[in-house]
Image: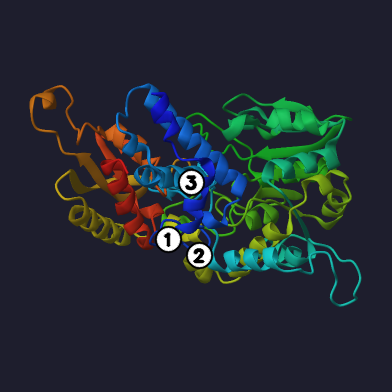
Amino acid sequence: MSTLFRHLPAVDQCLAALAADEGGLDKSQNPGQSPGQSLGLHALPRPLLKDLVNAFLDLVREEIRAGAFADQAQLSLGALYPRMLAYVRQGARPRFRRVLNATGVVVHTNMGRSLLAPEAVAAVAQAAAHYSNLEFDLATGERGSRYAHVESLLCRLTGAEAALVVNNNAAAVLIVLDTLCMGREVIVSRGQLVEIGGSFRIPEVMAKSGAVLREVGATNRTHLRDYEAAVGPETAAFMKVHTSNFRQVGFVKEVPLRELKTLAVACGLPVIEDLGSGSLLRLDADGLPGEPTAAEAIADGADVVSFSGDKVLGGPQAGIIVGRREIIERIKKNPLNRALRIDKMTLAALEATLRLYLDPDLARGRVPTLAMMTRPLKSLRSQAACLAGLLKRGLGGGIEVSVRPGVSRVGGGAFPEADLPTALVALTPVQRPGADAGLNPGTHHGLSVDGLRQALLATDPPLVARVEDGALCLDPRTLAPAEHPLVLSALRQALGGT
């Protein structure tokens, strides 16, 4: 065994071989990848490469101890190199990287929520690569406001007097409450005090802001008289909260914003509305009713409205605040604003996205979130058929491929009751013939449907799908046609164990 250890190549030899192998370190990319997504190993820091080589050699030493090698020739650099190269390539991949979303959930929080429009992607690249007029007024040559770049667009799109953007909607709710309600009561319907993703709870955010929660009504029914009875000397505001992916049905009642505004005017109080996902367009014609737009909230009397930029709107992560000028100016002066402000790349992406909304038809076609949410079933069936055909040709007989009806989801807490009809590509590993088939049905080379789903998480790029009715299902709603070859590649990797 000690003789075998001595025949392992030195670390410096391994590093020299990696550096010299331009073919092994090629800069070739998978189909569909953009430039810069797959860097050659020559571009990686030498300390990282050294750590990976050392880790590989440690792995080989463990294999020697386990008796995996009997011949010194098996431990030469030439013999070990292909394995070492694969190991180093895998270890050098970034932790934060691209995945293929075949789940059919458009605004998938765990996978980065909304994809940006091409115009927004270009704007981010421009902002990242060059100096900009982030807080520089080109008309005067003096310091300017970063919010000026999007404020007029937000006012035009929502009908608000003024606007402000912070880093997400939770931050927007926090700074609004901190500015308007610190140390005083905010009246909220009990039916709207829900917990949404990431254990985000309105009562806890309210407590952090220094405001005091005053619950009114019952869990399922709140009346205008409940709000009126709760008003007192310590009342700072009324607040309406979007309940995200929670809904009550049956014997339920909430007070419409217009009615609450009438009471608020009589009491001299502002109305705050947290729209959650938020939207700038009505989507009723696309089978997605029930979500008020920011413009409707302003028109119905809300004094300040907050909503997300990276959900239904389809832009970057941001918390958008619109409303009365006097209130927005107070929020801008809050010291918290500096801690919660957006950066230049978010600002660039948001401006580019909002400009598309000036033409609603253009936004529907160019903003990926809107395009995916409103994609016609006929188009999805056609894409599913194309993907299924590609997989049948590319995978041979190892996988049964079929197309079946199914549903997609918007995600992100938006339109929780809406089923979006789709066509799913269903994959089932062919049952392995022989004596083991009865013991392990639905396998291909020992791989079950759940095993295939798990194996796809380790491919390059990873493919995330869902298991439904005994099959691995791919939803073309969230897969671009240009990604279909990558889907085939991922499946080949998973089935081949490469």
Viewport quadrant of the C terminus: top left
Name which of mark 2 and mark 1 comes first in the sequence: 1
Asked which quadrant contains residue 79, the reply is top left
Q: Nearer the viewer, mark 1 or mark 3?
A: 3
Label 2 CA crowd tier, 10 Å (few <14, some 14–19, many 20+): few
Q: Amino acid at mark 1?
A: Gln
Name which of mark 1 and mark 3 comes first in the sequence: 3
Q: Which mark is residue 35?
A: 2
Q: Is residue 216 toward the left or the right of residue 445 in the image?
A: right
Q: Is residue 433 toward the left or the right of residue 67 in the image?
A: left
Label 3 CA crowd tier, 10 Å (few <14, some 14–19, many 20+): many
The residue that label 1 is drawn on is 29
Provide residue 438's location: percent of width, then percent of height. 12, 24
Give the secondary structure at mark 3. helix
Give the secondary structure at mark 2. loop
| Residue that sits furthest to the left in the current view | 434
Residue at 63% across, 65% down: 125
Residue at 61% across, 40% down: 242
Q: Amino acid at mark 3?
A: Cys
Instruction: Tell me the distance, in whole angstroms, between the alpha carbons under discs 3 and 2.
Output: 28 Å
Depth check, front residue: 267 or 407? 407
Name which of mark 3 and mark 2 comes first in the sequence: 3
Q: Amino acid at mark 2?
A: Pro
Does 188 appear above or below 324?
A: above
Depth check, front residue: 437 or 171? 437
The residue that label 3 is drawn on is 14
Q: Is residue 136 toward the left or the right of residue 473 in the image?
A: right
Q: Nearer the viewer, mark 3 or mark 2?
A: 3
Viewport quadrant of the N terminus: top left
